[in-house]
Amino acid sequence: MFKPARMKKVKLLLPVEQEDRFLKEVSKLGILQVTAVERRPSNFSTDINVIIEKNNLLNLVKRCDAILNKLPKEGIITQLIGKSSRIECSDEEEAEIYANAQSILNNAEDKLNKLEKLRMLKLSTRKQISLKISSLLKENFIVLKRINKTDYLVILEGWIKKSDANKLIVIIPESVRKECLVLLEDSTDLKNILKVKIATLIQNYSIIDEILRSYGIASLSEEEEKVEAKKVEDIEEIIDVDLLKQQVTLLRRVLLRKIEILKAKENIVRTSFSIYIEGWIREKDLEKLVSMLKKGYTYELSVNDPEKWEEPPVALENPPIIRSFEIITSMFGVPGYRQLDPTPFLSVTYMMFFGLMFADVFDGILLLIFSLLLYRGLGSRSHNGKMLSELLIMISISSIIFGFLTGEFMGGVVKLPVLWFNGFEDPMYFLQIAILLGVVQLTLGLAIGFLNELMAKRLRNALEKLAWLMLLYGSIIVLLNYLQYLSGDFYLYFGSATAVSGLILLMIANLRNLIEVTRLVSNIVSYTRIVAINISHVGISRAFTLLASPMIYAGGFFGILTGGIILLITHAFIVFIESFIAFAHSLRLHFVEFFSKFFEPMGNVFKPLSLSW
């Protein structure tokens, strides 16, 4: 858990006719990363046709992307919380799709061209109609589109110039004006022209009609409005956009799976009769590979430990409950194969920092609901989306726990007992807790750095990490003695000697470390941001609570409803803004203060050949 998975170097010789079967079966297991052959055996060479085929498939993928970019896209809300309708297919269906790739793309591009032509014609139609309306209004007061009659009412719909809007009201006789309803709204396609609707009683229609005709009426019937649209219908065919998108997306996935196989084949050297493969496999998966090869393969297998000069790919292995925090580690980089994995330590401190900054039961519940929706939507669409949503679930639970510990619920709407402390009410105690957490995390970072340097046998660097620990804790002992938390000359002398010894060692290792001493102080002070962000969060929550409380406590259904809506909207805003701030500052504390003490992102991610859908 605290170190990357142990890797083994694999060298495999197979008959050439078993190549496709082997790659297909090992990809289903997802256990082997095929790498370039370091020392090519004599008479073995790469197949140039593999590279040509891969480039051809990449061009087909580009055509798929071009088609998908022109099709309507899902809204951002749907992408975040809408469940993905991911489609899988059997090997036979995949082979059929691959064989018909060109025809599928040609058909899709043909339909897309017709769809684009249809859109252009519709746009042209609307433009022609707009020009006709503008032309008619130059000689007439109003252009009527539709007259709807019932037994009691008549409704006239049409267009009028914006400059004639007031005139329309004036010309309606006072005898029927009170029985008329006139609605005016801007026209999206026409400048300085308004859409108009006139509703009146059926007995007033003749009067209205006579008045409008005296000023000039033109008619644009629905049939006339759709004359150009009928031309569109002549070339339009029924195009199921969703089906088209589904077909192209599925083809794209099939092509990408084939490309992954071809990338593996690029690294394989061959003769007319044999293929030679080199790669990396996790030690725990070696038995799966051997078991698979024993089922009908003719093979020669060599398995070796990594050489000291080799840097194997890194596969982090963590329990499911903290695996989602690997996404934070990977944001900074991948640890080296022989380094400690910071994810287990990170999972504890990150949840603690975020929970302290965003401590509120209600806000934590809102964030948890959003995280669960995100898990259902984005989590079903990609591996990283799943890890991110799982991370948000974990930190929202932390927010709820620290909300109970600090007695915060919706800015004080519900009074909870304070189980530990309330940072808003007792900021000085909170400040001590933040500084203590900073010292603990910096100690952990320097200790991990010390162990990493020892494992890499860089004793000079290990001594430097130890010197930083001596300086840190020697200074803390002196400070505590000065503040009379530790009494007696022993602590003063011991702390001073430890701090001075650490400083001397740092100067021996590198004189520039004198400048870095001030950085250590700033690192510790940086953890006070936990207090500042918590107080800001609680203060804003309580301010909104004060705004809504008079309505809620005034009683009555309307007051409770209005106050509740205000609280819900404002806390949704708080969750959106404050959770992002807490998330970003928690990242900052780990990337700048913690990781800088030991983390060297020098590893390469283990990428086994895998064709999962």
Image (tube, helix red, strand yellow):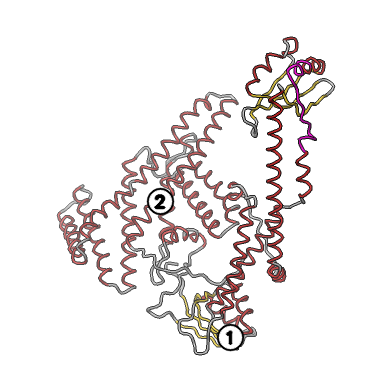
Q: Which kind of residue does numbered mark 1 sit on?
A: Leu
Q: Quadrant of the N terminus?
A: bottom left
Residue displayed at 60% across by 77% down = 23
Taking 299 as reference, is 74 above or below it? Answer: above
Q: Which kind of residue does numbered mark 2 sit on?
A: Ser
Q: Is residue 553 left or right of residue 311?
A: right
How far is mark 2 from mark 1, CA to CA? 51 Å
Magenta span includes 214: yes
Within 10 angstroms of label 1, few (less than 14), some, or many (20 or more) residues? many
Q: Disc 2 or disc 1, which is closer to the eye?
A: 1
Within 10 angstroms of label 2, few (less than 14), some, or many (20 or more) residues? many
List x then y, in percent, for residue 264. Answer: 55, 75
Report the disc number at residue 14. 1
Instruction: Pick out the residue farthest to the top.
Output: 175
List x then y, in percent, for residue 331. Answer: 44, 58
Residue displayed at 16% across by 53% down = 488
Kindly state the secondary structure of the residue where label 2 is placed.
Answer: helix
Q: Give residue 533's quadrant in the image.
A: top left
The magenta span reads: 210-226
The residue indicated by pointer 2 is 586
Q: Quadrant of the C terminus?
A: bottom right
Taking 565 as reference, is 178 above or below it? Answer: above
Report the disc number at residue 249. none
Residue displayed at 62% across by 61% down = 63
List x then y, in percent, for residue 584. Answer: 42, 49
